[in-house]
Image (spheres, helix red, strand yellow):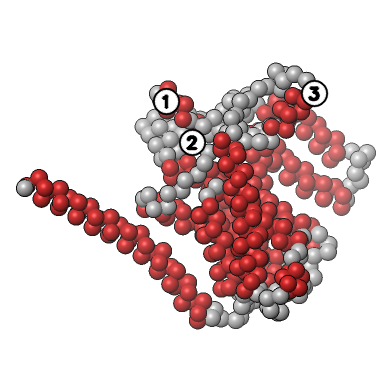
Amino acid sequence: MSREEDAELSPTSPMDELSAPGEPEVEPEPGLNGIPVLGGGNAQAIGMAALAYVATTQDVLEEGRDKRRVGAYAAIACFLSFSMIQFRDGPFIRPHPAFWRIVLGVNLLYELALVFLLFQDLGSARTMMTYLDPNLGKALPEKSYGENCALTVQNVWDSIDIFCLAHALGWFGKAMILRDYWFCWILSIAFEFAEYSLQHQLANFEECWWDHWILDVLVCNWLGTYLGMKACQYFEVKHYTWRGFRQSRGIRSKTKRVLTQFSPHDFTAFHWHGTASFLHYVIVVMLLAIFLAAELNPFYLKSLLWMEPDHPFVIARLAGVFLCALPAVRELYQYINDPRKAVRMGQHVWLLLATIGTELLVIMKWSKGRFPAPFPERVKYGWAFGASLLVLYPIVRQLILLGFSSIYLSAFRLAAWT
């Protein structure tokens, strides 16, 4: 690899994902650049000693229900410890590569839980949720937001609640993930159309027109997207110079160094170029579909499992998808824009795809007979029209490009002949 190519290589990118074609792939070493995280063997020895003491003595917990509960937590902790030490590095190294390995481990645990739930009926799943939270397992009334749709100051004011802040924060996060204004705007509008299409199934999707397009799209979504893109622009132009903690002198300098550990090591601006090639177009459409599914799935899951929108499990799921999507989208962008270096999609991409897909399977299985109302005709025609545009657009664009190329080539030949 030349010096110029090496300079372009992001220090946050794992070398095993960036092998040039024809070169043998190098097996990654565990830890950070081959150095075990937290002293691998020492961490394992300490963990085993703690497990042995708590599990085999009565000093901390008595045998019975408490130890069954703690045993489940200990199994999860052991799995995440293994993930932290042995999983491959992702595309980020801040705040620490071990953090992103734990994120991958949590995503894998969630995927395994979804696979287990896929083989259960809805009644059994609701009962199992009560083991995690005894307050669950009770049917909840579906709340509609489209009962009084007169455009008045009082109605608009009554519609402003904590979920407006959640909307803005969510779109701030999506802007940080996608890093593209057009992408966020298309996704924002597509989600509102999806709510229109599915409001015959979930009353939560039934909103007033001004709630859809003014309060959601033009206020909350735009504000979150705008602030997110401003943060992206700041990180993009920021000058990154890293000094070690020991090289920082003074309390103020050391405190600043600790805080900057939670900022990006570097920042890459995304230019998706959805029409640059057929591969770009397909992956951009696929990414839009994935984000739409990731947005819609929690509405169905909380409705089927009888969870309030502000339940910790729902919030944890949303936060977890955000953390998992950050490295996944980075890996996907690198794969489609530099296939010479990124010879395959990364582990975060594959696991995120599997997670969203398994959620859809669970929802489809549990939804049988739960939503008897048929899709309205206008919804069927609308989605058929949208799907036709998605298929026809690349075809027509390619034909236009071929037409212009033929005209240019004919004019060039005519000029050469004359």
Q: Could you say whether the residue bearing mark 3 is in a helix, strand or loop?
A: helix
Q: Residue at x 9, y 45 (%)?
A: 416
Q: Residue at x 66, y 65 (%)?
A: 215
* Amino acid found under the numbered disc labelled 3: Ile
| Percent x, y of residue 101 | 64, 38
Q: Which residue is mark 1?
A: 4
Q: Quadrant of residue 309?
A: bottom right
Q: Which residue is mark 2?
A: 17
As measured in the structure, the alpha-carbon distance from the residue carrying label 2 to the one carrying label 1 is: 19 Å
The 10 Å Cα crowd at callout 1, few under 14, some 14 to 19, many 20 or more, is: few
Q: Residue at x 56, y 68 (%)?
A: 194
**In screen coordinates, is 4 left or right of 115?**
left
* Amino acid found under the numbered disc labelled 1: Glu
Q: Earlier in the sequence, mark 1 or mark 3?
A: 1
Q: Could you say whether the residue bearing mark 2 is in a helix, strand or loop?
A: helix
Q: Of circles 1 and 3, which is in front? A: 3
Q: Of circles 3 and 2, which is in front? A: 3
Front residue of this view, candidates 204 and 33: 204
